Amino acid sequence: MTSQASKKADRIFVQDGRRAYRRRFSGTEVRIGAVVLLALASILVWVAWKGAHPDPSLFMLETDLSQTGAVQSVARGPVPDQLAPAGWSEGSLAQFDNENLYEKIDGREGYYKSFGFERLYALSLLASDDPQIAVDIELYDLSTAANALGAYAGERAPEARPDIGETGLTHIDRNALYLTNGRFYLRAIGSDESPQVVSLLAHLRDRFQSELPSEPLPWGFAIFVGQMGMEPGSVSFAPTNAFSFGFAHNVYSARLDDNTELFVTPSTDAEVDALAQDYRAGFLQYGEEDGDLVKDRYRSTYAGARSSGAWVVGVRSAKTAAAAREELDRLANIVRATPLPETGDTEATKVESQDEAEPEHETDEH
């Protein structure tokens, strides 16, 4: 039996698949078929026409939507007046809080809320000669300077080198400006990298730096970044349980490299020596004494802590004892002349997103 005959034999009800057994077709079926074909043809024509004539509003920056009335204009708050320089025009200012932040940055609002988000001010500046050239501005009120620095650190590219001021950090990266000043974090993103946009970003940097409400850098940044010249991205803050020590509160730390870490915490004249001994005892849980330091029995690195004025300074994971003592001396000399932070000025927010502290060694000994 041929293959064709076999397939035909397998058919139970219709032996000839191409043969029509109906003597005639209903006129209703023909009309319905014609309507369906006409509808499909109409849809095809409409899609082709819309593709050739797109809605111009689809090409607007997000903040430009506020100019169409989609977002109600609000008071300027901390945004400087007459922000647009010559050759630029300013769109309507929009404001978002915890209830409607998702309308502006859906899917990203959780990041800013983790840094104490209170309010977002958003607007666009448009080039007068070409509205397609624009800079989209987002100004976040994050409640404390530590939070603003934390949000900035999480979005700063590793290769970016910020300028350090008395009240915040800033840098321009291609078509974008990032800036912190006190409790505020600013992002200004341009539509291109043209000299016209870069010049506007520099203008915005100067205006916001000089006119935003400001406050001094948190004491940890003032020490590690301002006085020691370390990278802002290397600094972190632990309000409690630093290094998994239950007694360790309000500790700023900064990494010198992949291993060595310096830390500092304020105390009182009466308690500072005892607190330094607590850190030493903590390090001895997984090490042994080596003069004024503790040598890690597992990693062969060095740790130590000492008092300097009313501060406790320390080092962890230094490769050599000499390097550990050198860094301790350098940090101790700096903080000795640094005033203690005011009461309550010990931020309870991590400056940079980081995992919860974990034990330094996974052993049964501690």
Image (spheres, grey):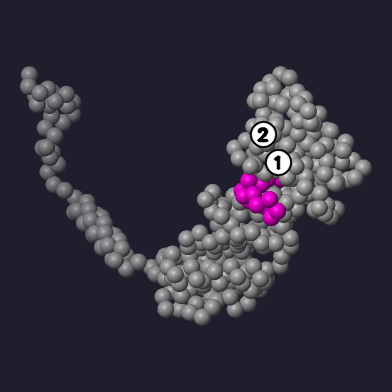
Residue 102: percent from the left, percent from the top? 58, 56
Quarter-of-image position of residue 117: bottom right
- Examine the rendered structure and indicate whether residue 231 appears above or below residue 46: above
- Could you tell me the amino acid type at mark 2? Ala
Instruction: Residue under label 1, please give it.
Output: 327
For the N terminus, give its image quadrant. top left
Q: Residue furthest left?
A: 2
Quarter-of-image position of residue 273: top right
Contact between marks 2 and 1 (CB within 8 A): the answer is yes
- Could you tell me the amino acid type at mark 1? Glu
For the C terminus, give its image quadrant. top right
Residue at 26 percent of width and 57 percent of height: 40
Q: Residue furthest right?
A: 270
| Viewer-closest of 349 and 325 | 325
Instruction: Residue under label 2, please give it.
Output: 318
Mark 1 secondary-structure assignment: helix
Indicate yes or no whether the magenta region holds residue 354.
Answer: no
Mark 2 secondary-structure assignment: strand
Residue 25: percent from the left, percent from the top? 16, 48
- Examine the rendered structure and indicate whether residue 5 appears above or below residue 261: above
**CA gap, disc 2 and disc 1:** 9 Å
Residue at 82 percent of width and 44 percent of height: 308
Pick whichever of labels 2 and 1 is earlier in the sequence: 2
Residue at 66 percent of width and 31 percent of height: 320
Visible residue check, residue 169: yes
| Residue 295, numbered circle | none
Quarter-of-image position of residue 7: top left
Residue 360: percent from the left, percent from the top? 68, 29
Residue 92: percent from the left, percent from the top? 56, 74
Visible residue check, residue 111: no
Q: Is residue 252 left or right of residue 234?
A: right
Magenta extent:
225-240
